Amino acid sequence: MFIALGEVLAATAAFYQDLGQPPDPHIAKRLQYLAEHRLAVLWSDLAHMRNDLADRHQDHPQRRACTAEVGPDEREASAACACPPPPPRLTTSPVAAPAAPTPAPPRR
């Protein structure tokens, strides 16, 4: 994801560079800076957080124990019991389409 975002920022910077308005070179430089320097910081921070969570080796306090058997067509056990089930959806009735406006009388 960060690679794609960096590519988008770099392409946008190149686009701004050629627009020709006085603030455009500054915006292009800022976008290039974000792509080259700030994304690496975000990636590093998120990687450290992920590694910290992975190293804990403990269950989430809100997660229930999985007692279900995983079928052969399921990808992994966590797919069966990873999280509490989502709340039930509210049923709604379909919304009627708005009526067509009445045409205005012809002008005289």
Image (spheres, rainbow, N blue to C red):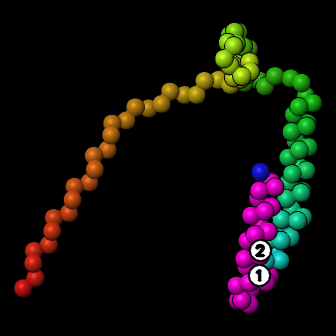
Q: Are marks 2 and 1 in contact (CB under 8 Å)?
A: yes
Residue 90 vertical position relative to residue 63 in the rendered view, above or below: below
Q: Is residue 13 left or right of residue 55?
A: left
Q: Position of residue 14 (x, y in %)?
A: 77, 76
Q: Main secondary structure of the magenta part?
A: helix
The quarter in which the C terminus is drawn is bottom left
Residue 33 vertical position relative to residue 86 in the rendered view, above or below: below
Q: Per the image, is 88 magenta?
A: no
Q: Position of residue 77 (x, y in %)?
A: 74, 18
Q: Pointer 2: residues within 10 angstroms few (<14), some, or many (20+)?
A: many
- Tell me which segment is drawn in magenta: 2-26
Q: Is residue 17 left or right of residue 47?
A: left
Instruction: Name the element at disc 2.
Output: helix
Residue 59 vertical position relative to residue 67 in the rendered view, above or below: below
Query: What residue type is disc 2 on?
Result: Ala
Can you tell which mark lies on residue 17? 1
- Mark 2–mark 1 distance (CA, rounded to whole Å): 6 Å
Q: Residue at x 10, y 82 (%)?
A: 107
Residue 85's quadrant in the figure?
top right
Q: Is residue 88 left or right of residue 2?
A: left
Q: Position of residue 7 (x, y in %)?
A: 78, 62
Query: What residue type is disc 1 on?
Result: Gln
Q: Per the image, is 8 magenta?
A: yes
Instruction: Name the element at disc 1.
Output: helix
Q: Which residue is mark 2?
A: 13
